[in-house]
Image (cartoon, rainbow, N blue to C red):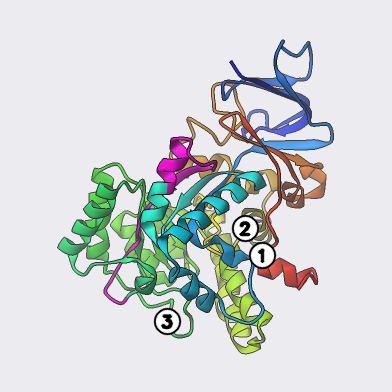
Amino acid sequence: MSTIVIRHATVLTGTTAEPVVPDARIVSVDGEITEIGPDRGPVPDGATELDATGCTVVPGLHNLHDHVARKSLRISQRTTSYRSQSDVLMQQPAEFLALHTAANLAAQLASGVTTIRDFGLPGAGGIQAMRAVREGVIPGPRLYSGGDPICITGGHSSNWGAMEADGEDAVVRAVRTQIGRGAAVVKFMGSGGLGTYPEEEPGIPEFTEAELRAGITEAHKFHRPTATHAYSTEAIRNAVRAGSSTIEHGAFMDAAVVAEMVEHGTAFVPTLSSVAGIGWQHRLYGNEYLFGRIQNEIVGRHMESVALAWKAGVPVVTGTDTSGEVVEELELIAEATGADRLDVLASATRTAAQVARHSDLTGTIVPGLRADLLVAEGDLLTEGFEVLRRPRWVLRDGVVTPGRPLPLGVRLSQLRGLV
């Protein structure tokens, strides 16, 4: 029996009943939280004791939109665009991408991310990585991989490994193919994308509502959640009406489509940190024109969409896409909404676990749930989300990993004068 005792921490439980427990201790036995409360009484014999004095403990963070084979794009290069970096990486041998995936999973785990929803590109590696983590072959967060996203012929990410399908029957076959390969979630490309802008127009709807409905209905029949990449209002509306579990990116929302999201119970994964990062990458290598266009025409409107959805009660959760970071995502959601810090934190913990459909496992710190925890140095309540960039320890199923922060993304690196 393995027992871990975290002592003298300020614990942010993620619950609404008792959100903050000062000078607390958490006991984990064989990966399950068995106690959370004031730090009183002796430590059980044989337990591993972690002194968290001066630390904040939060539930493990969720990254519900990622591409684990491509995560090195966060460490941006001075001489090339996001698209060019991605094109080069996607040309690498599958064996290299598999090793790359393993390294990225380990890095994210050490930073405090204990759950990732992966959308492939390429997809087979993500599905096998999911299996490898589950079977203990490699360390990593809880991983839910969608395999290859499904797109129209020549549509968004078709050049990076997405599965092409046109028409309702073909979309259904593509869904069945991904599920047959082991996909835990199914993703559809409902519009163009920003990573290839301006060669590709992110606002153009690609799949029709009928095509999306056919694929989403098939995925839900097999109890797989669905995610739809959609930038424009029309593309978002198509996905919501078709029944998509989540909208990914969702830069251009209006009050009417947000009302439909509320009606359908659709969640929102805005990936603000990645969308902003694409523009800041243009600035890094000297393309001020594209930086300005993305900032003025997309990022500002995107922030307004997040505020609109949040105010209406749409579940807004953290996802980083390729070039973002969960902590930066929390900071941008807070900036967009002006919401209370603990409410925003739920976007990466309690609410995210509900959207990931495993709130019976993690997302809050209560007895009976798994010990997915981030122990970070400092007081989040007074210092802000920056504290989460100072991980001391990360627990995933009660297994302790020494904390190690991720490098800052391209936006913050420039704002802080580091590049």
Residue visible at 79% across and 42% down in the picture:
377
Q: Which residues are magenta?
A: 129-154
Q: Amino acid at mark 3?
A: Glu
- Up the image or down, 34 lies above or below 92; here it is above
Within the image, what quadrant is residue 160 found in? bottom left
Badge 1 or badge 2: first in the primary sequence: 2
* Count of marks overlaid on the render: 3
Question: What is the spatial separation of the Cα atoms under label 1 and label 3, in whole angstroms?
Answer: 24 Å
Q: Residues within 10 Å of mark 1 (few under 14, many from 20)?
A: many
Within the image, what quadrant is residue 42 found in? top right
Which corner quadrant holds the C terminus?
Answer: bottom right
> Which residue, given by chain and number where applicable, does mark 3 sit on?
200
Residue visible at 22% across and 52% down in the picture:
176
> Which residue, given by chain and number where applicable, does mark 1 sit on?
409
Discs 1, 2 touching: Cβ within 8 Å: yes
Question: What is the spatial separation of the Cα atoms under label 1 and label 2, in whole angstroms?
Answer: 7 Å
> Which residue, given by chain and number where applicable, does mark 2 sit on?
325
Q: Secondary structure at mark 1?
A: loop
Residue 18 is one of the magenta-drawn residues: no
x and y percentages locating residue 122 in the rendered image: 39, 62
